[in-house]
Amino acid sequence: MQTVLEKLTFLEGPRWRGGRVWVSDFYTHRVLSANEDGSDLRVEAAVPAQPSGTGVLPDGRLLIVSMRDQRILRREQDGTLVTHADLSPLATGVLNDMAVDPQGRCWVGCFGFDLMNGAPMESAVLIRVDPDGSAVVVADEMFFPNGSVCDGRTLVVAESFGERLTAFDVGGDGALSNRRDWARFGDPPTSRDISEVLPSLAVVADGIAEPDAEGAIWVADADHHRALRVREGGEIAAELATPDGLNTYAVALGGADGRTLFLACAPSFLEHERAHTRDAVLLATRVEVPVGSAPA
């Protein structure tokens, strides 16, 4: 593996677009982009309430999850940030990761409970934000909806504490139907104590990458020092171990030829351990199967 970016706090939502890798750094409150090798590092936006997932509208304007004030921000052509959608009336807990589909619709998850302070685990909702900024809850009873991908027809969401990737069919109007397991790794937990839940999970599916050319999805396994290449149905086609002491919290597939896997890694996810340290890194390695299509 090669180090692309280093000396950061906690990285989330890596994506490859416009010939650059984009990533959010939680506790320096910045959205960053860089060349594939980490050169020409740019600060794309400053988000005081903590950035997470990003995406772009069909006209190229950047969208950013602002976690703690439960908003989606939009970067205008002149670089200013404005509120694209206020999700505080709908969100259950702080906002999490996001996918933006080719139609410009955002699919946004929530924590559902106070993870950082060890509150009892609760289910969360998934929210759709339309291009005009209107928003609606489209799914509930999700166990920490996290990384997601959507091509406009199928939405796949990682449920970090649900032992699964969940898929939906997406209608022309954005309605979801045919909820199903895209991949199941084990049974959902019965305990609400997160200190008991985490050690019991076979896979803690966090961030996920755009499907590759064979339809498989790379999944960051946030508690087992690895990333997994998963086929629909749950077969683990490949396992990639991360360096000692680092967990993988998000992944992206891209690069000039689509065969670079980017991995957002850190020693842990807890805010009190990450906020004042600078040991999170963005790594990269080469894989055999390229990304299937350019992300939105």
Image (cartoon, helix red, strand yellow):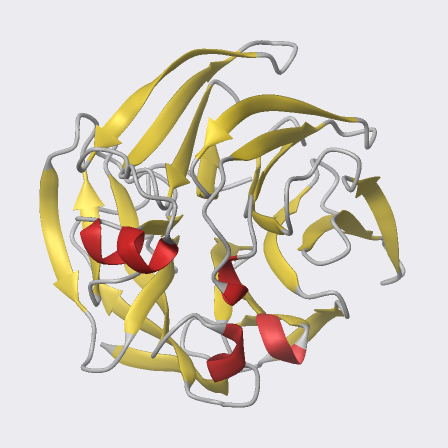
What residue is shown at x 76% (from left), y 39% (from top)? 87
Q: Residue 294 vs residue 263: left or right?
A: right
Q: Position of residue 32 (x, y in %)?
A: 61, 71
Along the viewing direction, whichever of 236 and 95 lies nearer the viewer = 95
Quarter-wise, where is residue 185 in the image? Answer: top left
What residue is shown at x 77% (from left), y 48% (from top)? 71
Q: Residue 86 vs residue 99: left or right?
A: right
In the image, residue 49 sits, relative to residue 257, either above or below, namely below
Q: Position of residue 127 (x, y in %)?
A: 63, 31
User: Is any part of residue 55 visible from this angle?
Assistant: yes
Q: Quadrant of the image for the N terminus?
A: bottom left
Say how many tags the image has: 0
Q: Position of residue 193 (x, y in %)?
A: 37, 52
User: Is any part of residue 20 visible from this angle?
Assistant: no
Q: Position of residue 105 (x, y in %)?
A: 66, 30
Q: Residue 150 vs residue 185: left or right?
A: right
Q: Quadrant of the image for the C terminus?
A: top right
Along the viewing direction, whichever of 79 and 195 lies nearer the viewer = 195
In the image, residue 162 sits, relative to residue 11, either above or below, namely above
What residue is shown at x 35% (from left), y 44% (from top)? 161
What residue is shown at x 22% (from left), y 58% (from top)? 199
In the image, residue 179 sits, relative to residue 266, either above or below, namely above
Along the viewing direction, whichever of 68 and 85 lies nearer the viewer = 68
